Image (spheres, rainbow, N blue to C red):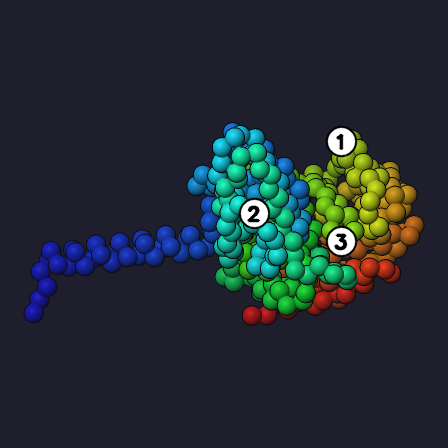
Amino acid sequence: MKRSKSSKKAGRFITAVVFVLVALAGARWYLGPPLPKPMPPGIPEHLQVRLEGCEFLSPHKGQVVLVAKSPSPRVVVTNTSSSDQPFTFLMKNTGLFNYVWPTPGGRSRHIPGVGFLVDARLRSFERCVYAFTPIRQPHPFEFAVVGASEGIDNPFTNHRRSYFVWNDFTKKVNNSGAHFVVHVADLLDSGRSYHWRQFVGRIRRLHVPFLPVLGNEDVSPPEGRTNFRALFGREEYSFVYQGCKFILLDTSNKTFTPDQWTWLESELKSGGTSRKLVFLHIPPWHPSERIYLPEWGESAGRRFTDLMSRTGVEAVFASHRHTCAVGVKDGVQYWITGGAGGKLDDSFAGYHYLHVRVPEKGPLEVTVVPLSNRP
């Protein structure tokens, strides 16, 4: 029995619609979720909010959105009115990490791949502290340092090696006992919005907080810096964890401004911690070649290394060069790790990341963990 012309047209129309829907679904999978647009945080009028180890991001569906900038963020909320006040916030960048923390005056739940959602109601003049306390508290604690992933987008591009290397990294870190990950950049091979969207989709598989610095590839084109801020907040920040101070710097412009020097010196000279660790993308000094890198120049590089030595920094972790190197200068360890998927400068280093163990006493214990670029 022959089909009529109208039924053939209807069949072609349905086929075209299905094709378009599949293409749109594939594009959304490839690109990942859209990036948030900059907006005010949207704090209710009668609430005062103080943040420790976290920052405001753009609100989402009427909720206050925060991003963790340390493994143990705290949110202190005070109701200044004589009536009860609702307060809902979402804490992002907690991975699938297990936290033990109180939920005074409300409920909380974990949204896999997104973060913790807190729905609270504060009584009149009540002050509540929401402290995200990791289960893995006692010394020694451990964390991972990784650099130069440069892509990790999907297995069907010229950068597919980074996809498989990052898969292996995610599996190993999730089973390593690390409390968090520090990425010393380059995160991407371009700062375009769709690259950031792909990247966010991949790091959601981590079970621990993800704490990045910004690299020169990540801000090319300039919209990359705006995208970074929308996802992770400020480019430079510090936090204290288990008596150890972590300082994360921005060297993506290949310069270090007077304001950055002032902030860094202030952070290093503030007391109360027994250890200090510094993280940045472009190292001032190459531990294998034993030279100051041209991106810094000898004058600025020497100023940086002198400051590290003078203020008692234990170790500096960087990337930029796609290799693995370590050396000591004036009592400070300098590490370069650039093996998370970008094209290697030398095959001897291999794909890798650093697993750092921080004992209560004694030096850092750093292990180079090999990674595979095979499916």
Task: Name the residue rendered at 72%, 67% in the picture.
Answer: 369
Front tag of 1 and 2: 2
**Within the image, what quadrant is residue 128 found in?**
top right
Estimate the spatial distance between the alpha carbons at disc 3 and disc 1, rounded to whole Å.
28 Å
Q: Which residue in the rendered view is the most extreme toward the right?
A: 330
Front tag of 2 and 3: 2
Q: Element type at marker 3? A: loop
Q: Nearer the viewer, residue 300 or 138?
A: 138
Q: Mark 2 touching mark 3, by CB under 8 A?
A: no
In the picture provided, is 339 more to the left or to the right than 304?
left
Q: Mark 1 touching mark 2, by CB under 8 A?
A: no
Image label count: 3
In the picture provided, is 234 more to the left or to the right than 328?
left
Amino acid type, residue under disc 2 in the picture: Pro
> Residue 111, can we see it?
yes
| Pointer 1 residue | 259
Q: Element type at marker 1? A: helix
Q: Which mark is residue 104?
A: 2
Q: Which mark is residue 242?
A: 3
Please tell me whether residue 281 is drawn above or below residue 4 in the rendered image. Answer: above
Estimate the spatial distance between the alpha carbons at disc 1 and disc 2, rounded to whole Å.
39 Å
Q: Which residue in the rendered view is the most extreme toward the left?
A: 1
User: Horizontal and vertical percent for residue 28?
Assistant: 42, 52
User: Horizontal and vertical percent for residue 1?
Assistant: 7, 69
Front tag of 3 and 1: 3
In the picture provided, is 249 more to the left or to the right than 312?
left
Q: Earlier in the sequence, mark 1 or mark 2?
A: 2
**Within the image, what quadrant is residue 54 found in?**
top right
Amino acid type, residue under disc 3 in the picture: Gln
Q: Earlier in the sequence, mark 2 or mark 3?
A: 2
